[in-house]
Image (cartoon, rainbow, N blue to C red):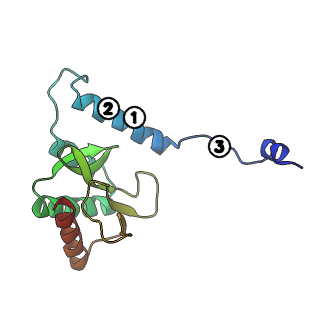
């Protein structure tokens, strides 16, 4: 059987994006629409309120982590502005997302993720981590995250 025949008889199908991925894209589109003023004519909700609302909607385990992260980030880097990004809590500097929290329930993964975008100043040689799996936060974890956030905005 040649490659062309094999690809047409494969039992695997590709359905495109998952429901969760499509939902995140819709949330991002709403965020962009709201930031350009083309959205509803009502009063804009500030980023802090949107982030706190998203955190409140999370399952308990992720909500506890997200609440601690929010407090750590606000204390460690007050120059970062809370906002939602693809429906996730995120923190931006000069309009660019520096770091974000992805609940494990967001894409039905086994752990939550705290990540940094390329605008974060974390470069360390030729390789460095940009995302961390989180299952809970210890005092040592909180100190490490605080240091990373401070470095990211330096």
Apparent side of residue 40 relative to residue 6 in the rendered image (left or right): left
Residue 129 pos. (x, y %): 36, 68
Q: Find the distance from the CA under tag 3 to the CA under tag 1.
A: 21 Å
- Label 3 sits on a secondary structure element that is loop
Residues marked 3 and 2 touching at CB (< 8 Å): no
- Label 2 sits on a secondary structure element that is helix
- Label 1 sits on a secondary structure element that is helix
Evaluate whether residue 90 shows in this view: no
Report the disc number at residue 30: 2
Sooner in the amino-acid sequence: mark 3 or mark 2: 3
Query: Is the C terminus in the top left, top right, bottom left or bottom right quadrant?
Result: bottom left
Residues marked 1 and 2 touching at CB (< 8 Å): yes
Decide which of 109, 100 is in the foreground and name it. 100
Report the disc number at residue 26: 1
Residue 148 pos. (x, y %): 23, 68
Residue that badge 3 annotates: 14
Q: Residue at x 16, y 46 (%)?
A: 48
Q: Residue at x 39, y 34 (%)?
A: 26
Sooner in the amino-acid sequence: mark 3 or mark 1: 3
Disc 1 crowd, CA 10 A, few/some/many (<14, 14-19, 20+): some
Q: Find the distance from the CA under tag 3 to the CA under tag 2.
A: 27 Å
Apparent side of residue 84 relative to residue 132 in the rendered image (left or right): left
Q: Find the distance from the CA under tag 1 to the CA under tag 2.
A: 6 Å
């Amino acid at each position: 059987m040649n490659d062309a025949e094999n690809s047409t008889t494969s039992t695997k199908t590709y359905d495109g994006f998952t429901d969760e991925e499509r939902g995140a894209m819709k949330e991002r589109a709403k965020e962009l629409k709201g930031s350009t003023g083309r959205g509803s004519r009502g009063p804009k909700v500030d980023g802090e309120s949107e982030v706190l609302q998203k955190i409140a909607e999370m399952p308990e385990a992720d909500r506890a982590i997200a609440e601690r992260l929010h407090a750590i980030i606000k204390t460690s880097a007050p120059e970062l502005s809370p906002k939602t990004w693809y429906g996730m809590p995120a923190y931006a500097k000069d309009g660019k997302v520096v770091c974000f929290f992805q609940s494990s329930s967001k894409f039905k993964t086994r752990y939550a993720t705290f990540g940094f975008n390329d605008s974060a100043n974390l470069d360390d040689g030729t390789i460095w981590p940009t995302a961390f799996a989180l299952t809970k936060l210890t005092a040592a974890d909180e100190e490490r995250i605080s240091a990373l956030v401070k470095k990211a905005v330096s």
